[in-house]
Image (cartoon, helix red, strand yellow):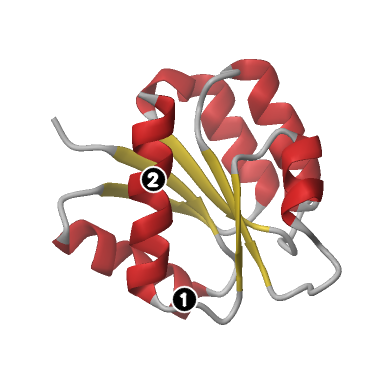
Amino acid sequence: MRFKILLIEDEENLADMVANFLAALGYDVTIRHNSCQALQLFKNQSDRFDMIVTDFNIPGFQGDQLIVECRKLQPNIPILLWTANRTITAQDVQQWGGNALLMKPFNLPDLVGIIRKLIKIET
């Protein structure tokens, strides 16, 4: 069984690059480019996903609100937030209910390391 990630990122090139990289490692990635679409999918199929990876600045509403809403649906799902916003801290992400923060730009091995760490923490 493949580990399933819901990826929310409005930059299509970045979303596709990350999804292709993770797919090559055996992950099943579903992409949404705005938070409203992502939340609707998650509301309808929250048990389909094992993890959420989201950008902070996305169309719809921001990543902090998305984290809060997803936590209401599945309290134990690992959530990674990435952002280029240097004012956001790991403590902020934890207060919103997220598990980890990754600053943009990032490299793909660092992303995979965080995902693997969160999988071990949450499973």
Compared with 33, 99 (above or below) is: above
* Quadrant that contains the C terminus: top left
103 sits to left or right of 69: left
Disc 2 or disc 1, which is closer to the eye?
2
Who is closer to the viewer here, 38 or 24? 24
Q: Which residue lies furthest to the right in this view?
A: 87
Q: Where is residue 88 in the image (x, y as percent from the top left)?
A: 81, 62
- Quadrant for the N terminus, please: top left
Residue 15 visible in the snapshot: yes
Residue 110: image quadrant is bottom left
Residue drawn at the location 81% of the way across and 48% of the way down = 92
CA gap, disc 2 and disc 1: 22 Å
Residue, disc 1: 14
Please say if 95 is above or below 23: above
In the displayed structure image, the side of residue 72 where residue 9 appears, left or right: left
Residue in view at x 33 percent, y 71 percent: 109
Q: Mark 2 points at which residue?
A: 117
Which residue corresponds to the image point at 78% horizontal and 48% vertical from the top-left? 91
How many numbered discs sit on the rendered protein?
Answer: 2
Q: Hey, which quadrant is residue 107 in on the image?
A: bottom left
Other-residue count near label 2 (Cα within 10 Å), few / some / many at <14 / 14–19 / ≥20: few
SS category of the residue bearing label 1: helix
Mark 1 nearby-residue class (10 Å; few <14, some 14–19, many ≥20): few
Give percent across and percent down for residue 72: 69, 18
Amino acid type, label 1 = Leu
Q: What element carries label 2?
A: helix
**Marker disc for residue 76:** none
Q: Are marks 2 and 1 in contact (CB under 8 Å)?
A: no
Inspect the image, locate mark 2, and give the three-letter code of the amino acid beneath it: Lys
* Above-or-below relation of 114 to 19: above
